Amino acid sequence: MFCFLGTKAAAARARAVSLITVTKMALTQVSSAKCFNGYQKVYEHESSELKCKMRFGIYLPPKAERVKCPVLYWLSGLTCTEQNFLTKAASQQAGAEHGIVIVAPDTSPRGCNIQGEDDNWDFGTGAGFYINATEDPWKTNYRMHAYITEELPRLINANFSVNPEKMSIFGHSMGGHGALICALGNPGKYKSVSALAPICNPVQCPWGQKAFTGYLGSDTSKWEAYDATCLARTYSGPLPDILIDQGKDDQFLAAGQLLPDNFMAACTDKKIPVVFRLQEGYDHSYYFIATFVGDHIKHHAKYLNA
């Protein structure tokens, strides 16, 4: 009996090793550059959720050569690829300083040959909105929420020197929306969350209404699962410590696309702690992101390195 159990355990271990090996083989390194004594890399893989090839950037701090590090996921905004954050945000120095792995995925599936996917800059390619589409022809490929919260972390955990128990998330604009809904929609999954100029209430703004109608259909009750303000109003779980920076001269704030006041009101009602900083003179650009990204990584380091 004892030997039989040992054989079963050995077989289970062998299957687990085999699965990890397959996962590792599925990653193709696209580029690698030394940066602040760590490495900024880009990888490509076949996504089971999105049914296409996807790329992500990953910064591996020097500490990752010795121990497993916490991991911080960045979600970019409309029209971006994984490259925008890697080359414009200047995040690597703070990642090295705090010993945090930073992962920056693409913003949508690509090359799926869906009619109309490249017709608009704010819908389709580059505009996945970090939701799981339910409408044809998008529902097969446009499953960015499942990709970000499930598939990508599995890949990262299996292939890199990270601590899967210490994971946080942040983002900008559409990606700030994504970070907030991933954290509020999955209580306790992330140690911390922050956002720069997030789309806070997409069910009430033109960008969100266009995307949600296309991806989720006309039943607006289905939209609320992907709206940070709606999720805050019904939130139940560990209280996240949220940091939000917003440029006061952001043209999209003035245009009513971001609606942070709605989110702040919902958080106040539910006693969800939020530090909201309105930054004088800053717009919606990567100059704004680069200015404050260090503060955000430091915010996450409080929880990831605790």
Image: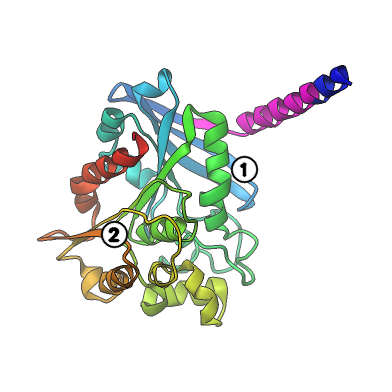
Alpha carbons under labels 1 and 2: distance apart: 38 Å
Q: Residue at position x 37%, y 77% from top?
A: 206
Question: How far from the left and from the top, in percent, is residue 96?
Answer: 30, 28
The answer to whether residue 79 of the structure is visible from this angle is no
Which residue sits furthest left? 280
Q: Reply yes or no: does residue 15 show up in magenta.
A: yes
Mark 2: few/some/many CA within 10 Å (<14, 14-19, 20+): some
Q: Residue at position x 48%, y 26% from top?
A: 161
Mark carried by residue 152: none
Image quadrant assignment for residue 4? top right
Above or below for 9 versus 300: above
Label 1: element kind: strand
Residue type of the residue flagged with mark 2: Pro
- Specify the quadrant that holds the N terminus: top right
Question: How far from the left and from the top, in percent, is residue 61?
Answer: 35, 27
Above or below for 219 versus 176: below
Relative placement, left or right, of 102 versus 3 is: left
Q: Earlier in the sequence, mark 1 or mark 2?
A: 1
- Specify the quadrant that holds the C terminus: top left
From the image, tell me which residue sits under label 2: 273
Q: Nearer the viewer, residue 194 or 129?
A: 194
Asked whether the beta carbons under mark 1 and mark 2 sit within 8 Å of each other, the answer is: no
Relative placement, left or right, of 35 versus 219 is: left
Residue type of the residue flagged with mark 1: Glu
Q: Nearer the viewer, residue 215 or 125?
A: 215
Q: Nearer the viewer, residue 110 or 274?
A: 274
Q: Which residues are magenta?
A: 9-30
Mark carried by residue 46: 1
The answer to whether residue 96 of the structure is visible from this angle is yes
Question: How far from the left and from the top, in percent, is residue 52?
Answer: 61, 49
